[in-house]
Amino acid sequence: MYPIWEVPYFSSALIIGLIASFHILPSHLAVGAFWFNVYIERKAYREKQLELLDFIKRYTLLILIFCFVFGSLSGVGIWYSATVASPRGISALIHNYVWGWATEWVFFLIEVATIYVYYYTFGKVDEKTHLRIGYLYALAAWISMIIITGILAFMLTPGKWLETGRFFDGFFNSTYWPQLFARTFLMFGIAAVYALVVATTLQNKAVQYKITRLAGLWGILGFLIGGLMTYWYLKKLPEPAQDFLFGGTLPYLKTLLYVSGISWVLALLYFLLCGALFPRANTLAGSLLLMLILFFGIFAGEGLREGLRRPYIVNFFMYSHQVVAADLPAKGIQAETELLSEAGYLSRLGYLPPELRKITPENQVEIGRILVIHQCANCHALSAKGLRSLPKLLSGMGMTDPEDLAGFLEGLDGYPYMPPFVGTEEERLAAGAYLSTLVENK
Amino acid sequence: MDSFANYINTLRDVSGLPFYPWLFDILLVFTFTCHILLVNLVLGGSIVLLWGKLSGNPYGGRLSRSLSRVLPISLSWAIVLGVAPLLFIQVIYDPFWYFSSVISAWWTLAFLALIALAFSLFYVYYLRGGYEGQGNPLWVFLALAALSTVAVIIHALSLQAVHPERWSEWVVKGGRVNFSGSGLYAFELPRILHFILASVAIIGIFLMLYARYFRARPDYPSEYLAWVERTGARTAFVFSLLQAGAGIWWFLTLPRTFHFYIHPLFLIGAGFGITLIVVLALAQARPSAYTWPVTILAFLTVFFMSYAREALRMKYLHRAGYSFADYPVHPSWSSTALFLLTFVMGLVILFYVGLVAFRAGRGHKEVGSHGLGKLAVTLSCLWIGIMVVIGLVISFKNGALP
């Protein structure tokens, strides 16, 4: 096991969640926007409405800066934060899907090349070539989504991979297609929101209203079909996830679903009223507010998607405390839960000096702290304030005695959303001893 | 096996590798070379921009205008080219990379935040008059400061990764484990100098190429371009010498037991480096005759030096009992083929896009090569079509659909 990065108050999982949710905005814009762009550009050439090009230039600059500064870096940010929050989790993904990411990377190269050429050759190359560069960008960006969706969906529904360990068996899994289509259509909606924002900055009112109207239509279409696809996705969720969400095991997930549902409805209303029907009603403040609402919706949606996978990083294969949960004979992998309950979790903490690898009365509490941080800190704050604070939850249950706490740890896998505590009896007692200091010092 | 080497082996990923490690290693070195060249361009470019802007020389001013556009674009490329080595290093050196990142978690994240900051500052400079010759150089200065911090961070992370023997003392202090991820533990001056000085040498060579490229454009005065070319050749020469000096210093600090002076990759790299310096010396009198030899030699030097850096990493990790050659392999032929075929296809598409950029930059409005352009679009569509067919077949076979 690697050491742990303990984030005070928040938990490391929440940091990933924040970065990942932010990333959705630029990344889906990067994918969706160009379809809107080439659509408008083609229209401009065909109908000889060259004033539309003014919009495209501004819009492209927004994409260039927002997507390629913040989008690409927040994308790497998800990866980095997952690396430091859950190295064995990201490692498992990379060692199975490295060629998927490498393939995606080829399209990143194409995206960077085409977006700069597109932006800087406005009016400097013939129309056909310029439009073609736009198409190349749009295709490459969509392909990058085709790839990353496979890996994301794999984490929730690894399906047949759990038996075969094969790349494509995990990639084209039961939630792949609904998720791909949902993202594809929702991204048109996201692109439409940005178009609404940019449109308000245009001088020429006729062009402004025309773009606003078109963006409204794109948004309505994208969100309606995207909503349908999301419904299909929810239907395809594996059973434990269905229980978490609809069975009331984790009520907060339902709240998240409502939040994203409401933001979806609000966005649709805005597209309809301030876009398609009354383009005059679209203002900079209004469209920015819409973007904020959308951000909350996405944040909730992503939180939901992550929450559904509890207590795993890769569903049914690796627990969120990075312990391998299942055998995979095809790759010679053995579950670690029983293995380490016998040999001891400490047997894997080779980075500790020898004096911290044998439990004694003097070091018992420190070792308990190490074990608790390793196995709980990904989801719980250890401080009295903070996300799912352990001292608070434990004292709420009225537990203070080390042995009671150790007993509680033994039954931890009774909770469907928590991984089992992995370790020997002695290690459980050490963790219990530390937890009791947490409750007492609260 | 001693227990620490054993620990490192338990850190290796349980899934093993999806292909033989040598392929990841070659890709790692090749993509790292491309990445570091772009990083050099960004760092060196910001230094030369500031110098040109502040020197008061009108040619320097003009050069700084061009560079204001070059910088954000190069930074984009540096980032996207950095993704690949970052990926491959995690495949074959995962225990070291992950350990080092986790114990410096906040720095790992600050690394990205600082790049985002520098990127924004480059754009602020470019869009607020930098390209027209105004613009406040403070922005570029701050960006340079941010990027230098980035260099220190990634330097420390790489160095921490090759010193597993010190991990324990870094993490545990006085019987208590530090899980805060707020420390940065390693720094070697000659090593980081050897990366930074190279930046200025590389930008010198870039300037030679710049002068050659824009000679075809009537709006670039030939005296200006001749000045750029001379400046570039001189800068490249002087900084290659300094770079060699830093390299020798670094080399002398390496552990004796490595016997690095007889390592073939190092010797090849050093050979190219010395040749480059000699050719740069010759180029001072008539730089334009040497643009291509210098460029090619510089690429080869950086490539082989990157390989030597890789060999050095192996030496360090051998000490800890690690070799990626023992990593269990479960070849995934299908996904390896997916990448390799896509890569070739990507090169065709990138060639077309590059051609458009090249011709447009030279002032041709009718760029031509429509056949190639159509091929690029067709290939992308074909890629999607093939994936969808494979996907549907597998999905129905596995019962993932309907």
Image (cartoon, rainbow, N blue to C red):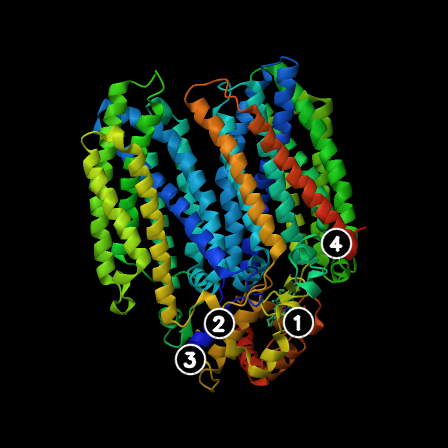
Callouts 3 and 1 in the same chain: no
Name the mark on residue A404.
Answer: none
Q: Are marks 2 and 4 on the same chain?
A: no
Which residue is drawn at the image coordinates 70% and 32% (left, top)? A219
Mark 2, residue position? B9
Q: Earlier in the sequence, mark 3 or mark 2?
A: 3
> Do residues under tags 3 and 1 come within 8 Å of each other at their CB atoms?
no
Please, is residue B33 above or below residue A167 in the view?
A: above
Label ID, residue A327: 1
Local SS, label 2 = helix
**Residue A350, percent from left and from top:** 46, 75
- Distance CA(mark 3)–CA(mark 2): 11 Å
- Answer with the quarter of the image where residue B176 lies: bottom left
- Which residue position holds label 4? A174
C-alpha span from label 4 to label 1: 21 Å
Front disc: 3 or 4? 3
Mark 2 surroundings within 10 Å by alpha-carbon count, few (fewer than 14), some (14 through 19), many (20 or more): some
Q: Position of residue B163 (x, y in %)?
A: 36, 66
| Chain of the residue displaying label 3 | B
Chain on which label 1 sits: A
